[in-house]
Amino acid sequence: MSKDLSERTIALVKATAPALEEHGLEIVREMYSRMFENAEIRDLFNQSHHGAEGSQPKALATAILAYAHNIENLSALAPAVERIAQKHVGLQILPEHYPYVGEALLGAIKTILGDAATEKVLEAWGEAYWFLANILIARENRIYTEQEDAEGGWSGWRAFVVDEVVEESSVIRSFVLKPQNGGPVMRHKPGQYLTFWLEIPGNAPVKRNYSISSAPNGTSYRISVKREPQGLASGWLHDHAVPGTILKVAPPAGEFYLAGEPARPVVLLSGGVGLTPMVAMLETMVAQAAQVPVHYVHGTHDCRTHAMRDHVRKLSAQCGSVTVTDFHQTPLEGEREGVDYDRAGLITDDWLLDNTDPASAEYYICGPRPFLRGAVSALTLAGVPSDRIHYEFFGPADEILAA
């Protein structure tokens, strides 16, 4: 891809890499500050990832530095480009939004780097920005077209009605959603997510991604949401999203999904609410009468926080190739090993490597950041190729990518 960039641009972008390494976070924070002066642009983003403790600025600074280092070998960034494109589609980011980002980025580079940001440097970064932006725009346009053309597909935000609410555990609640117009819905790929536009009184519009926790059926979606401490969106859904509530929803998106009928053994590994895409995958493989071994491994605190346990066990009973192992980190008094859970404690690296099939299995992983980081690192160090390690993490995944 780099053949379309001028040699001068490549040289100047690479030459600025040390400055980006030193000042990248300052540049990104300045860039977002400039962008968020425009309310329309600000409302496109999940604001919980920004601010003093937000992880998005760090993730973007890391991504910009990676771009500078790989400017001659952009194919190395293809997986990251696909992830970004899918996130952008979920947020309904359009070509007309890109000039705001480019202007903010160049203005931030000029402000933070001062005299070092010469006109030639800014021209080079402008060219580099639009080169990557055009790749993203083209990919996003293809995804939008596929979504709109699919049976039951749509573009933009569609009105869905909460049809049913199910208490899954002390912290997780499922919401079954059907289109307000009664039409069909696009059949998602198991593992993908929906993006929601929530209008919560007293707040700017809130955008959130939630994995679909049901297999594709053409008529409805199910999301399973954990009430997070101080969680604006999750708290509102738990407290206010009752049957009949109307929600604005973008089409299914995401590059983390079960592709077709697996030809290798599959390990579905989750922690906490990370089980949501795994249940969608498990339902799908049971419906397919999977011919490969499927090992569903889940960790949670105890029986109170263990969501969908009975549902998963029923699915396992329907398909002889499925094995389930549940871990309770701190079982409550009265919990019975072998009945309420399978093993006490955490899912350790040794247990994972000894009880799954690192030599041939496909691993699908979802859960909290430390859980993901540990699992991805353990499998990578054990020699599992990266193309057999698939994971989902909502929020900037810079630490996971580094692992």
Image (cartoon, rainbow, N blue to C red):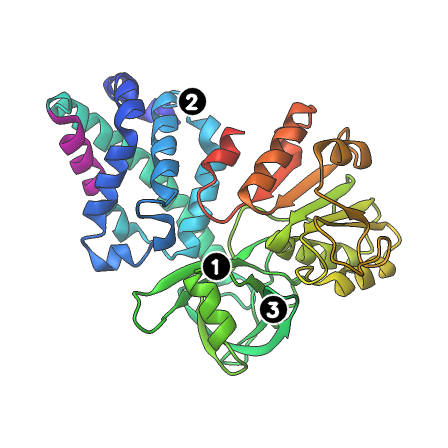
Q: Mark 3 or mark 1, which is nearer the start of the sequence?
A: 3
Tag 1: amino acid: Pro
Label 1 element class: loop
Residue 367 rendering spot, x and y as whole percentages: 59, 47
Mark 3 = which residue?
174
Q: Determine the residue positioned at 60% across, 41% down.
A: 371
Q: What stretch is highlighted in magenta?
A: 102-114
Q: Mark 3 or mark 2, which is nearer the start of the sequence?
A: 2
Q: Is residue 366 above or below residue 58?
A: below
State yes or no: residue 109 in magenta.
yes
Tag 2: amino acid: Asn
Please report contact status of discs 1 and 2: CB closer than 8 Å, yes or no: no
Residue 135 rendering spot, x and y as whole percentages: 37, 39
Label 3 element class: strand
Residue 274 is marked as none
Residue 268 rendering spot, x and y as whole percentages: 71, 46
